[in-house]
Amino acid sequence: MRILSFLFILFFTGAIWAQNNAVVIATGGLKLRATPGQSGKTLALAPFGARVQVLTLDKGEYGQVQYDPPARRDTIGVIFPSHSTGTSRPHVGYWLKVRYAGKTGFMFSGFLADPAWFGQYGRKELNNQFRLRTTDGNAGASNDPEFDPGWNWYAVYESSEGKFDLKKVQLRYATEDFTDGNGNYNFYPSDVVIMTEPPVSPHFLIGTRKPWNERSDVPCFWWTSVVNKQHLPGFAEFNASLMSQYGVSEQVVTIQEKDQLPRQITQWHLLGKNGERQEIVPLPPFTATLDSLFDLIFAGDLDGDGRLDYIFSSQGEMGYYVLYLSSQAHKGELARPAAVLWTWYTC
């Protein structure tokens, strides 16, 4: 799932280092070197999260990066491969002139991030106990990467068709550059990506304040497995039949809004073993609009309480992925929204 984030479109229309400073996102720290290259003498080691003053400015217009003074382009290793492509991408960046700890030198932009990229997009988390992220696409960083070491991170990925693994991982971060040798780019010049250690290329990452147990080959419903079967025509009937095994029902209804043509939306419900029925409703500020259309992405016991948890998606000009956990359900509920990954797309 390659998702373009409105956040990056917003901030990348101006200078990359709009505030003339950057955040070190290399978990092992980033070296300040006397000359632009890996062979340059080390002047200092800036720790993870340190702020540095960027002296190399981008004076280009939208669609092209033009560094002043000119910056050396370099490749250092690879960016962790995406599960959707399965290929490694070279870790490309520029040696930017920076000032840190009273010293002036050069740092590789592949481990620097503009602080304006994080925490200013106007969408809030649901709570401070859970997080939902992904390593794939811009959505991986669009909802404020968590640098707090107090989080426990778990990779959720499909081990085989109809089964998933939950594996504890450490997060690493890098800035992926999308410019060519002439500094040209489409949509945005760079993007912070989340990587995992060990590298498991998960579909989703879940952050929790309290540790969970790792598990393997847990039964699940995974949307991509169903799509890959390509049971068409009649996919809707097959899909509904399969989802009923996971306590989920869907119903297509027609709605009529003032001065608008009638249109159809899908209503989802969670179904309990004793007849309980819980409607899945859009998160604020979404109402009965195109953005409130849902897809069931995942169903399976993530938190290990013996009951089903879910990931739904709602896509439109603005959208999100939302994690429902059974362990967080209140009285009369089967599961409750615990974490959200906000997403946007552009044409």
Image (spheres, rainbow, N blue to C red):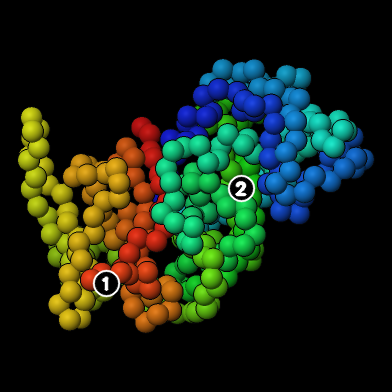
In the image, which disc is placed on residue 331?
1
Give the camera-side residue of 85 and 136: 136
* Residue shown at 21% from the left, 76% from the top: 272
Q: Does residue 173 appear to the left or right of 12 in the view shown?
A: right
Residue of label 2: 89
Mark 1 packing: few (<14 Cα in 10 Å), some, or many (20+)? few
Evaluate whether residue 152 shows in this view. yes
Evaluate whether residue 80 shows in this view. no
* Residue shown at 52% from the left, 29% from the top: 11
Q: Does residue 267 appear to the left or right of 169 in the view shown?
A: left
Tell me residue 245's x, y (percent). Answer: 23, 76
Q: CA distance from mark 1 to mark 2?
A: 48 Å
User: Quick one: which residue is furthest to the front in this view?
Assistant: 331
| Total number of numbered discs in the rendering | 2
In the rendered structure, which disc, 1 or 2, sits on the residue that comes first in sequence? 2
Q: Secondary structure at mark 1?
A: loop
Location of residue 207 with respect to 183 vertically, above or below: below
* Residue shown at 87% from the left, 33% from the top: 102
The C terminus: image quadrant: top left
Give the camera-side residue of 16 and 304: 304
Q: Secondary structure at mark 2?
A: strand
* Residue shown at 50% from the left, 37% from the top: 120
Tell me residue 296's x, y (percent). Answer: 29, 61
Location of residue 23 with respect to 270 vertically, above or below: above
